[in-house]
Image: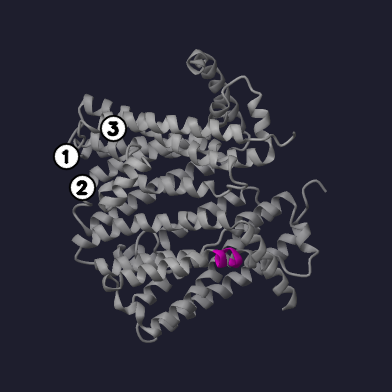
């Protein structure tokens, strides 16, 4: 498989991307620090919302305050990683298609989909990442159930699969730009998909919960890993996460190839 | 009026050509209140204070309508135009730049109104026995519509004020995003005021944001009986006057200090 054969090269390219992205961020330091602080402010706001929730109730759909903070902490970490690495880049695909910039990307000696997804890193998400790690560590320390090493590894494994499924979902949405004249509202989809990640999915009625687990696999991004950390994981969820991630990755690649076949260059 | 009519027609045509994007943005705006609805209905089922589940459901349905009606995004583009120097094209036009952005905003909302006038009345009709009966009172509907308009003008003038900071500050867009953060927490969108701790309520009551979202919705929920609704709309008018004056000053001073990039 060409992708695996080139994996060392891709890793070197990505390290280079990280370096140049960091240098670029440091050229606009005020903007960078304002972004970091804003991300931390958002984490504080979410903590405030959860404290208000638990001033009004003892349990949120069977989850106590510490467990909801586990979900929140994990959601901040996962969203920060996704925003830092591929979310913003995939969102740039529609204007790149319209402007013909993708012609330039297609000539690069790396897989085009990989380059589009990982061409730049957004470092201001570090604010959310560190705040999320601190919050997760605090929430686990005060939670009634302490996750074992196996629970933690399962959570990590499912999180990676969930991020893979989410990445695939974004690619599938972004490739609509090959077929539609315009898709500037792609950010609307991203907002749509990230909104439910911050809270336990048990607050939703059964129908939306099933839809967001199997048809738009958001549950495996944060909620199921949080279930692993709070002792709620059921064994069938692990192979389900593997199957869903594999299926969505396959669909994303099929959509990508179909989009490229449809693409006609802006310059010819 | 003739110039504004022509500008409206041009704005409408532009919004119509991007109707797909407008529709998708409306769907994404609706998602956040749906998630919050799920949270606060769950809370209200076990809570002795705040809103009842019926009131919470009604609250967030009207939050969705109110957000659709009062959402303003044009400050981002004005700040960008100032920083890039492209406001020069507006300075030579016979219509003020703020009319241009306001009509763009309203025309995009007019496109969104097409699915809204089908979706929300259908939802209200389907759920009518689970919603607060106050939403069917003509008095509340009348004051709601008035306060909705007031909320839109507050949101618009405030957003334009923040955009005008771009005359002096390169990071005006970032500062505007901080304004959005405060808006989200203090407008009654993320947390209904009825669930908030008293200290938070007191602080947020002094900010203009609660008069954009929470005020119209609370009027519809019947939480502004008697002359209370008139008082709230009066406060909206005060905020509109304040921000209009600030905007006029910022715009005038900004143009005096403005140097177009590259010239």
Q: What secondary structure is marked by label 2?
A: loop
Seen from the viewer's position, the closer of residues A133 and B47 is: B47
Q: CA distance from mark 1 to mark 2?
A: 9 Å
Q: Is residue B229 above or below residue B30?
A: below
Q: Residue B121 shows which numbered tag?
A: none
- Mark 1 and mark 2 lie on one chain; the one further toward the N terminus is 2
Question: Where's residue B241, x and y in %?
Answer: 58, 75
Task: Give the residue at x 36% y 44%.
Answer: A197
Residue B251 visible in rendering: yes
Reply yes or no: does residue B237 show up in magenta. Answer: no
Seen from the viewer's position, the closer of residues A21 and A225 is: A225
| Residues at circles 1 and 2 in contact by the CB criterion of under 8 Å | yes
Q: CA distance from mark 1 to mark 3?
A: 27 Å
**Furthest-right residue in this view:** B263
Residues in magenta?
B106-111
Name the magenta segment's main secondary structure. Answer: helix
Q: Is residue B226 above or below residue B99?
A: below
Reply yes or no: does residue B108 show up in magenta. Answer: yes
Q: What secondary structure is marked by label 3?
A: helix
Where is mark 3, residue-wise? A240
Question: Where's residue B158, x and y in %?
Answer: 57, 64
- Mark 2 and mark 3 lie on one chain; the one further toward the N terminus is 2
Q: Residue A64 shows which numbered tag?
A: 2
Residue B202 visible in rendering: no
- Mark 1 and mark 3 lie on one chain; the one further toward the N terminus is 1
Q: Chain of mark 2?
A: A
Where is mark 1, residue-wise? A144
Seen from the viewer's position, the closer of residues B252 and A214 is: A214
């Amino acid at each position: 498989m060409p992708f695996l054969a080139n994996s060392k090269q891709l890793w070197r390219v990505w390290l280079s991307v990280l370096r140049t992205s960091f240098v670029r961020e440091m050229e606009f330091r005020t903007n960078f620090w304002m972004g970091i602080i804003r991300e931390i402010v958002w984490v504080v706001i979410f903590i405030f919302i959860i404290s208000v929730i638990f001033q009004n109730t003892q349990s949120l759909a069977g989850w106590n305050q510490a467990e909801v903070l586990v979900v929140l902490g994990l959601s901040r970490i996962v969203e920060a990683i996704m925003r830092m690495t591929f979310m913003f880049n995939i969102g740039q695909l529609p204007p790149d298609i319209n402007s013909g910039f993708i012609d330039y990307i297609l000539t690069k000696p790396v897989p085009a989909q990989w380059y589009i997804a990982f061409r730049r890193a957004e470092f201001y998400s570090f604010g959310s990442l560190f705040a999320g790690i601190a919050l997760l560590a605090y929430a686990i320390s005060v939670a009634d159930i302490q996750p074992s090493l196996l629970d933690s590894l399962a959570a990590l494994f499912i999180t990676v699969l969930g991020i893979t499924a989410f990445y695939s979902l974004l690619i599938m949405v972004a490739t609509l730009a090959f077929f539609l004249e315009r898709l500037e509202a792609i950010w609307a989809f991203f907002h749509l998909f990230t909104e439910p990640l911050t809270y336990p999915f048990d607050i939703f009625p059964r129908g939306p919960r099933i839809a967001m687990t199997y048809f738009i696999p958001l549950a495996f991004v944060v909620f199921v890993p949080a279930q692993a950390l709070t002792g709620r994981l059921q064994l069938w969820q692990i192979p389900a996460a593997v199957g869903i991630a594999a299926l969505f990755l396959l669909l994303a690649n099929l959509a990508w190839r179909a989009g490229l076949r449809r693409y006609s260059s802006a310059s010819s | 009026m003739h110039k504004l009519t022509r500008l409206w027609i041009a704005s409408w045509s532009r919004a119509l050509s991007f109707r797909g994007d407008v529709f998708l943005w409306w769907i994404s705006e609706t998602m956040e209140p749906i998630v919050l609805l799920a949270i606060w209905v769950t809370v209200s089922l076990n809570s002795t204070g705040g809103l009842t589940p019926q009131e919470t459901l009604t609250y967030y349905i009207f939050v969705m309508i109110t957000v659709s009606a009062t959402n303003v995004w044009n400050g981002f583009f004005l700040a960008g135009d100032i920083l890039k120097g492209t406001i020069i094209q507006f300075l030579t036009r016979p219509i003020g730049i703020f009319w241009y952005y306001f009509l763009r905003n309203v025309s995009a909302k007019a496109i969104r109104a097409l699915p809204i006038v089908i979706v929300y009345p259908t939802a209200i009709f389907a759920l009518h026995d689970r919603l607060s009966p106050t939403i069917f009172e003509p008095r509340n509907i009348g004051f709601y519509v008035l306060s909705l308009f007031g909320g839109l003008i507050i949101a618009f003038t405030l957003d334009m004020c923040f955009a005008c900071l771009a005359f002096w500050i390169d990071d005006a867009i970032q500062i505007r995003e901080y304004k959005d953060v405060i808006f989200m927490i203090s407008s009654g969108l993320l947390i209904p005021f009825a669930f908030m701790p008293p200290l938070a309520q007191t602080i947020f009551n002094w900010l203009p944001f609660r008069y954009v979202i929470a005020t119209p919705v609370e009027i519809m929920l019947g939480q502004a009986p008697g002359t209370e609704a008139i008082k709230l709309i009066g406060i909206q008018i005060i905020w509109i006057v304040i921000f209009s004056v600030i905007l006029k000053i910022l715009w005038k001073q900004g143009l005096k200090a403005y140097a177009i990039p590259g010239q």
